[in-house]
């Protein structure tokens, strides 16, 4: 064990070992006799706080979640099935709750995916990589399966072909163990993004494939029909290396390697009015956001969008609670949320926003110092602020750990953290 000393007030290191023999009081011009060695040690002890940390101590992984608990997406069984008599179920979690299952099972969470009432965790342990799910399973959205690598499998509701397989009229999805292996797709799929009733597959080369409901043009295939076979999206992104797809609702944002933004889908709330007067676009178009700089992150909610640039600035547009107060309800042009609302000030001038995600009606932002900020509609406590009210400005969530990854479902939020010590 080794001690780490912290002083309550500034202390001169030279003076610690050699005290001045006489000290003169400037106000009364009186001479104060020198302290004895015993008094010096006592005074030094009073001014010093000693903390002990193990030589081999490591920061532990932590998982916190909040929002709608009635679906089981939070992953804490006692909320829905109280362990003690007289306790009532908890259906809404308004503050970050630590998920201890991962600690008990000695699992390290590497990635999180959040859907409509369910959560999926990718974990590693001495047993290898495992996939865990919790929450609604009415359409067999979650489960445990082992399959060969370099293959894409889907499960859940396929009413609109969003699982990439033919639609079966009258098919019952509940308690259905069927897992579908996608066919006729590239073997270099790197990411999968699920929207409302549509899906995207992103390859390592930056190509995008889609399937599912296309009534708002959200599949980006040049029509408004339903598609059950993953098909390559062309239009404005053809030949462009795409690195991120954002689509919680029916408006889609695609981010390129160069930091350009492309969009298609629903524009009923002026999300895409920069490039069209129509309420729907069925093919990707480039969004000229020159004043926003190079974009590194994008998020698309039900009626609003957000982007983050390389300078750590966050811009919002669309309709609803955007984060700039109750007076700004709608804008077709991206507007920057003032950096001080994310903790950037004279004492901490280097604080930057590095990530943003969203549910249907709320945003969650992550800064480079591990802080989490939320704003929007507080449906089922999805903001995690401990109070039941909508939040018109970004407000910091109280989490007893340093956050490094954030993920949103429709009405719940999960964050991956490191303990402070």
Image (cartoon, rainbow, N blue to C red):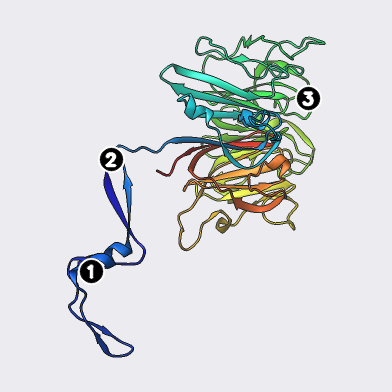
Q: Secondary structure at mark 2?
A: loop
Note whether 171 is above or below 257 in the view shown.
Answer: above
- Mark 3 touches mark 1? (CB < 8 Å): no
Which is more foreground, mark 1 or mark 2? 1
Please tell me which residue lies in front, 281 or 76: 76
- Where, quadrant-wise, is the C terminus in this rendering? top left
> Tag on residue 55?
2
Identify the residue position indicated by label 1 in the image. Answer: 40
Which is more foreground, mark 2 or mark 3? 2
Residue 132: give x, y in percent of width and height.
56, 21
Q: Looking at the image, which residue is at 73% across and 10% down?
A: 166
- Specify few, some or many for label 3: CA neighbours under 10 Å numbering under 14, 14-19, or 20 or more: some
Task: Find the distance from the CA under tag 2 to the CA under tag 3.
Answer: 61 Å
Asked whether residue 286 is in view, the answer is no
Q: Looking at the image, which residue is at 58% across and 15% down?
A: 144
Please tell me which residue lies in front, 21 or 389: 21
Note whether 321 is above or below 254 in the view shown.
Answer: below
- Mark 2 touches mark 3? (CB < 8 Å): no
Task: Find the distance from the CA under tag 1 to the CA under tag 2.
Answer: 30 Å
Please tell me which residue lies in front, 68 or 369: 68
Q: Looking at the image, which residue is at 53% across and 28% down?
A: 101
- Mark nearer the N terminus (2 vs 3): 2
Residue 125: give x, y in percent of width and height.
43, 21
- Specify few, some or many for label 2: CA neighbours under 10 Å numbering under 14, 14-19, or 20 or more: few
> Tag on residue 224?
3
Note whether 9 is above or below 244 in the view shown.
Answer: below
Q: Looking at the image, which residue is at 75% across and 47% down?
A: 320
């Amino acid at each position: 064990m080794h001690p780490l000393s912290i002083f309550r007030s500034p202390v001169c290191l030279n003076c610690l070992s050699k005290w001045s023999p006489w000290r003169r009081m400037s106000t009364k011009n009186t001479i104060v006799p020198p302290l004895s060695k015993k008094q010096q040690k006592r005074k030094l002890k009073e001014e010093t706080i000693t903390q002990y940390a193990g030589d081999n101590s490591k920061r532990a992984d932590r998982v916190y979640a909040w929002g709608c608990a009635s679906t089981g997406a939070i992953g804490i069984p006692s909320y829905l099935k109280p362990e003690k008599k007289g306790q009532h179920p908890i259906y809404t979690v308004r503050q970050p709750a630590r998920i201890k299952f991962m600690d008990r099972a000695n699992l390290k969470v590497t990635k999180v995916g959040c859907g409509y009432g369910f959560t999926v965790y990718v974990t590693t342990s001495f047993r290898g990589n495992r996939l865990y799910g919790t929450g609604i399973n009415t359409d067999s959205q979650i489960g445990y399966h082992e399959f060969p690598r370099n293959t894409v499998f889907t499960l859940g509701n396929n009413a609109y072909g969003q699982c990439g397989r033919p639609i079966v009229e009258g098919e019952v999805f509940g308690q259905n163990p069927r897992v579908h292996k996608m066919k006729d797709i590239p073997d270099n799929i790197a990411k999968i993004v699920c929207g409302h009733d549509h899906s995207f597959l992103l390859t390592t080369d930056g190509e995008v494939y889609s399937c599912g409901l296309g009534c708002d043009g959200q599949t980006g295939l040049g029509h408004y029909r339903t598609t059950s076979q993953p098909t390559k999206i062309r239009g404005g992104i053809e030949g462009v290396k795409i690195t991120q797809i954002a689509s919680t609702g029916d408006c889609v944002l695609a981010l390129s390697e160069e930091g350009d933004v492309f969009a298609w889908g629903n524009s009923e709330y002026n999300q895409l009015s920069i490039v069209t007067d129509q309420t729907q676009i069925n093919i990707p178009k480039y969004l000229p956001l020159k004043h926003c700089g190079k974009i590194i992150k994008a998020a698309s909610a039900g009626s609003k969008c957000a982007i983050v640039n390389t300078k750590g600035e966050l811009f919002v547009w669309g309709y609803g609670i955007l984060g700039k107060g109750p007076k700004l309800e709608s804008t077709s042009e991206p507007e920057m949320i003032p950096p001080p609302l994310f903790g950037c000030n004279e004492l901490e001038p280097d604080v930057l926003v590095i990530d943003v995600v969203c549910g249907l009606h709320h945003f969650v932002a992550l800064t480079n110092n591990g802080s989490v900020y939320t704003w929007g509609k507080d449906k089922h406590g999805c903001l995690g602020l401990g109070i039941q009210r909508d939040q018109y400005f970004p407000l910091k969530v109280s989490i007893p750990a340093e956050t490094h990854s954030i993920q949103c479902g429709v009405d719940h939020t999960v964050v991956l953290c490191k303990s402070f010590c």
